Image (spheres, rainbow, N blue to C red):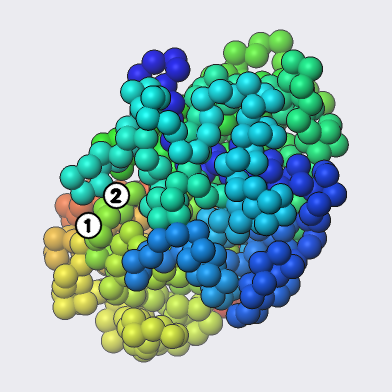
Amino acid sequence: MTADTIFDAASLTKVIATAPAIALLVEQGKLGLNERVEKWIPGFKKNGKGAVTIRHLLTHTSGLRPGLSPRPEWSGVATAIDKAKAEPLTEQPDTKFIYSDINFILLGEIVRLVSGERLDLFVSKNIFQPLGMTDTGFLQPLAKRDRIATTEQVGEVILHGEVHDPTARRMGGVAGHAGLFTTAADLGRFANMMLNGGSLQGRRVFKKETVKWMTASHTKPPMKIKRGLGWDIASPYSSPRGSHFEVGSFGHTGWTGCSLWIDHATGTSVILMTSRTHPDGRGNVIALRREVATLAAEALRAFSFGSAAAPDLTARRTVLNGADLLRIRPEILPKGSRVGLITNHTGHDLARNSTLDFLLKSDWVKLKALFSPEHGLFGKLDEKVGDSTYANSDLKIFSLYGETRKPLPEQLAGLDALIFDIQDIGCRFYTYISTMGLAMEAAAEAGVKFIVLDRVNPIGATAVEGPVRLGPTDFIAFHDIPIRHGMTVGELARMFNSERGYNAKLQVVKIDNWSREQVFDTTGQPWTNPSPNMRNLSQAML
């Protein structure tokens, strides 16, 4: 690897090529942000998609699912667009953030339809060439192959100069969501153009106003996630912001490991070029991105991140629970593994997308068993809960608050891992932690890995109060801990595993951006009543 190595930019394509192309067409008056997609792609409105606009696609609030199914086998841009037309909505527009490649596949096609040029040709002529980004483009020439970083081995072949994203490969290498190749130097030129209000070295690409509205938040309350037009501002994907850059800075990541973050307040851009998918797709650079950005900010000694003009971000950084990190890093779970899930209505991410639905729709793992705790899967019951079947599926829900409170061996048979994702309330007698302990014991006995998607302690984790339960334990006093235990479910899992001698194969997906003194309403996470009688944080604190 050298300074001029060319990298597969993956989803940086969205903000270096596709979103800027759309913005330029809007600036030229050829396209409107609030125009419906149906205007440009006839037939798109079927299956309830008639209200979806260009802005919805850019902000990932269209309600479309994350990606097109690879099955049955298909190829070609026209087929991709036909498949996108046939997609139903999973949510109504403007109600949830669902990061979706389908959004940008459609936007790439809209660039072609509005401009009369294929996306790669349009951005090369109107953006890359004026900025002197000589190594940036789709479909890299053979002459540059020796400079291109390899990515993942697919079958017997290591991808080298061919786009890593399988959907973009099916589309011939030019797509709105992925396919771009670039270098650190070229990304630096693009970032400097953005920092300079749309121009670089006398060449204007965008009006200043265009850069401002591209990078302003366009998501609407009650969504707490902030997204610009393509750009990430504050979401579960914002690890490249690090610990100091303010909300209002912006950037994006790519699946292959590249990332870009830009901060107008300090005039700084942070560019990280990696090929984390080489050779087996298991590399992880999330922590590295955060650390690099944090160090870059700390190097700006002349800038006070705690000033009135740039308030300290530490009190308002969005906390990421284990469920959020699973969306960003599906490789937490071994590919192809058969998993069980213990969850309820609290098992969701920052955008309220349930972990259950995420795993059901996943091509990465196979969800084979589902378990519910006290109050049932939807948190509404106040009596014993029986087994049932999950809506619109043949997936059986095994109750852990009915005839048995511990998974049975036959219910765990054939599983590689059992996942726990439930929000605790921070006190000993809340039975969700008892369910976790018994399930971990069952997993250990069955030789099944036990994975806890950790969640914040909503009443903070610095205070420990009340007497320690000693003697025989039961379902409302599962372990010898104080009433207010000051621990997260992941920390409790480690304690149970050690002190109760389970010797389970335990993995805890740790919380990110959380300080122990934080209570729930400072985390940026959406509150969900954990049970029928626990309706707000004040009740939990009392």
Determine which quarter of the picture holds residue 430: bottom left
Residue receiving disc 2: 507
Residue 166 showing in the rendered view: yes
Percent x, y of residue 20 = 69, 41
Picture quadrant where residue 447 is located: bottom left
Mark 1 element type: strand
Against 414, residue 298 (above or below) is above
Is 156 placed left or right of 487 in the picture? left
| Among the two numbered marks 1 and 2 on one chain, the one whose residue lies closer to the N terminus | 1
Measured as percent of width and height from the top left, residue 307 is found at 78, 23
Residue at 71 percent of width and 49 percent of height = 115
In the picture, the disc for residue 449 is 1
Indicate the amino acid at tag 2. Gln
State whether residue 522 appears in this view.
Answer: no
Amino acid type, callout 1: Lys
Q: Residue 125, labelled with which disc?
A: none
Crowding at label 1, few (<14), some or many (≥20) Cα neighbours within 10 Å?
Answer: some
| Callout 1 touching callout 2 (CB < 8 Å) | yes
